[in-house]
Image (spheres, rainbow, N blue to C red):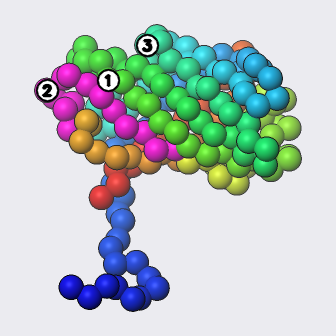
């Protein structure tokens, strides 16, 4: 077999929308200049064609602030479906704020995907539920739709499976 000498890709990626979710957030706790922890409060929602539920404890984001100012997500959470199944969600991701979006976020303003230059995560799932076992076998990406810090803080994502 000859090696591929082309400079372009030899395969393609496609996405399919799976669901949206909203996770209620406590105000961030600054550990030092390089880390914040954001607790995920119970509640919120997960809504899609094949899954519906809400977030239950425990859950949090160990948010690392990189020297460039970009944030690295390290999120772990627990979803309880409307039919009683438990699904562990974990993901890493990148947030690249502008100076303006960082200031607005820290002031408690509601921001959308149009306000923050880059906010993408890569969730995976783990469950023992037979009904939702298909989640154990896929890689997904999620894109932030809305975020707000403060007493009524939350983050909302749209989530897609990668094919």
**Left or right: 143 in relation to 4:** right
Calculate the distance from the C-alpha at mark 1 to the C-alpha at mark 3.
10 Å
Identify the mark at residue 56; answer none if there is no mark. Answer: 3
> What residue lies at 55% left-to-right and 14% top-to-bottom?
41
Identify the mark at residue 6; answer none if there is no mark. Answer: none
Would you say residue 91 sits in the magenta stretch? Answer: no
Identify the mark at residue 130; answer none if there is no mark. Answer: 2
Q: What element carries label 2?
A: loop
Q: Name the residue carrying label 1.
A: 87
Q: Position of residue 109 (x, y in %)?
A: 78, 33
Q: Is mark 3 on a helix, strand or loop?
A: strand
Q: Where is residue 80 in the image (x, y as percent from the top left)?
A: 34, 17
Vertical arrangement, residue 14 with respect to residue 55, above or below: below
- Decide which of tag 2 and tag 3 comes sooner along the chain: 3
Calculate the distance from the C-alpha at mark 2 to the C-alpha at mark 3.
20 Å
Q: Give the range drawn in magenta.
A: 121-134
> What residue lies at 38% left-to-right and 46% top-to-bottom?
140
> Which part of the image, by quadrant, shows the N terminus?
bottom left
- Decide which of tag 1 and tag 3 comes sooner along the chain: 3
**Left or right: 20 in relation to 145:** left
> What residue lies at 66% left-to-right and 45% top-to-bottom?
95
Task: Say if residue 24 shows up in the picture.
Answer: no
Q: Are marks 1 and 2 in contact (CB under 8 Å)?
A: no
């Amino acid at each position: 077999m000859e090696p591929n000498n082309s400079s372009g890709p030899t395969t393609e990626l496609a996405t399919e929308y799976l669901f949206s979710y909203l996770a209620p957030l406590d105000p961030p706790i600054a550990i030092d200049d390089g880390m914040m922890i954001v607790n995920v409060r119970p509640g919120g929602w997960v809504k899609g064609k094949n899954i519906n539920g809400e977030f239950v404890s425990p859950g949090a984001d160990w948010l690392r602030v990189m020297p460039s100012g970009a944030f690295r997500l390290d999120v772990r959470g627990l979803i309880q479906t409307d039919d009683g199944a438990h699904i562990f969600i974990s993901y890493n991701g990148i947030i690249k704020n502008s100076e303006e979006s960082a200031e607005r976020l820290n002031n408690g303003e509601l921001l959308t995907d149009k306000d923050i230059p880059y906010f993408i995560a890569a969730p995976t799932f783990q469950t023992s539920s037979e009904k939702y076992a298909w989640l154990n076998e896929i890689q997904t990406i999620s894109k932030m739709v809305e975020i707000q810090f403060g007493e009524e803080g939350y983050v909302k994502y749209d989530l897609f499976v990668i094919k």
